[in-house]
Image (tube, helix red, strand yellow):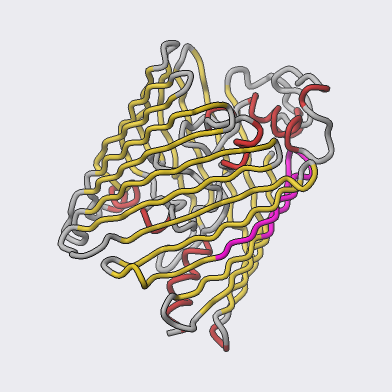
Amino acid sequence: MRRRALALALPMLLGAAHLGAEPMFLSKQYNRCTSCHYSATGGGLLTPYGRSLSLQELSASRPSQSTVPPPPKGEGEEAFLYGALGDTLGPVDVGIDLRPSYLGLDVGGPTSSSKELLMTADFMAAYRAHGFTVYGEVGRKPAIGQDSAGIYSYEHWVGYQSEGGLGFRVGRFLPAYGIRLSDHTAYTRSPLGFDKYDQVYALELSQTGQNHLVQLSVGPGSADAIVHGDPHPFTATGRFEWDFGPRTALVFSGLYRDKTTLVPANGAGGVAFGIAPTRRISIWTEADAQFQQGLSGAPAYSLLNETGFEVFRGLWLKVSPQLRTNYGDTSGGVFRWAFDADLYLRTHWNVEVSYYHDATRGTDFTYQTVLAQLHLYL
């Protein structure tokens, strides 16, 4: 039992680099990913405005944004390589993301494991002009399971956003669904098929309004499966967000994947609600039901709450109770307590320490995971 748990948990956590999307910043009145990121679903390269905010709003070493005006693009501490290149790249923005990490997994006895590794080593670039965006990421993909390490482009797409709010993008990306938490191993992410390397090739259509955001995507399915010539299901997703104010958001999501020779048709539906009662507290809650063709009884449920508190400027503490049930058995599954501390010392680097306690329901089996990361965003 313990060896089986280790075999299942370790490959997942070896790819557990956080992706840079932080819904807790709803407390700073940023309820859309595009406030700081090029990607409409969050994560990846920061825009020049996002880089500026990382210094003025988040860094423990700097005063608030209201007292220090941001420098011109290409200048200042928050710019690429500390502004060494100035504005020589013109309309092209680039970034480097490095995450040396320590991972420890304790399942009891000799099967426990620990490892020091470079979780992320990525180069990102974007070009934006006349409403069009060309975006790409390339980096090191760690060895996971039978897959060897290598250089990989896991996100690349072309998009357009009109002044009226209509937009599209086509290429490889993670489709919009629920809350894109920085921890992609969360029970509302990985079990539903939104892990670090679960991108799809798809066309996404969007409509952005002052108080709402609609995102719909359709495509041939898993990008990895397509690249390797494996069976890949037609995939469609939909996400609707309504903002009741700068610190309150309600999200409805849907997902459908067609059957393949290996996996039956399946889908999910969910609702999420976020509220930030103060500038130092954010609370997100998400509930999802996952269905699979041919299975009777209750769907598999995923429930999650993430509460973040800024103890003082630059230091965030987060707690997240999570539940994942089994298909047809709401009394089974796994319950998790996740605790996280993020220290944003300066705009180009921060330290993150996470602790997970997972308990298999109906048994006395538990396992603990510790993940420590130094995040260098250059």
In the image, taking residue 376 as reference, residue 40 lies left or right, namely left
Percent position (x, y) of residue 221?
Answer: 27, 45
- Quadrant of the image occupied by residue 260: bottom left
For image coordinates 67% across by 43% down, the residue present is 281
Percent position (x, y) of residue 92?
Answer: 58, 23
Residue projecting furthest to the front: 277
For image coordinates 44% across by 40% down, the residue present is 155
In the image, taking residue 137 as reference, residue 301 lies left or right, namely left
Numbered label tally: 0
Q: Is residue 344 magenta?
A: yes
Whether 303 is drawn above or below 256: the answer is below
Percent position (x, y) of residue 217?
Answer: 31, 34
For image coordinates 46% across by 51% down, the residue present is 196
Residue projecting furthest to the bottom: 109
Quadrant in which the C terminus appears: top right
Quadrant in which the N terminus appears: bottom left
Q: Main secondary structure of the magenta part?
A: strand
Q: Nearer the viewer, residue 236 or 144?
A: 236
- Quadrant of the image occupied by residue 153: top left
Q: Is residue 280 magenta?
A: no
In the image, taking residue 14 as reference, residue 65 lies left or right, namely right
Percent position (x, y) of residue 187?
Answer: 45, 58
For image coordinates 42% across by 16% down, the residue present is 165
Whether 279 is drawn above or below 196: the answer is above
Residues in magenta, as a range = 337-353
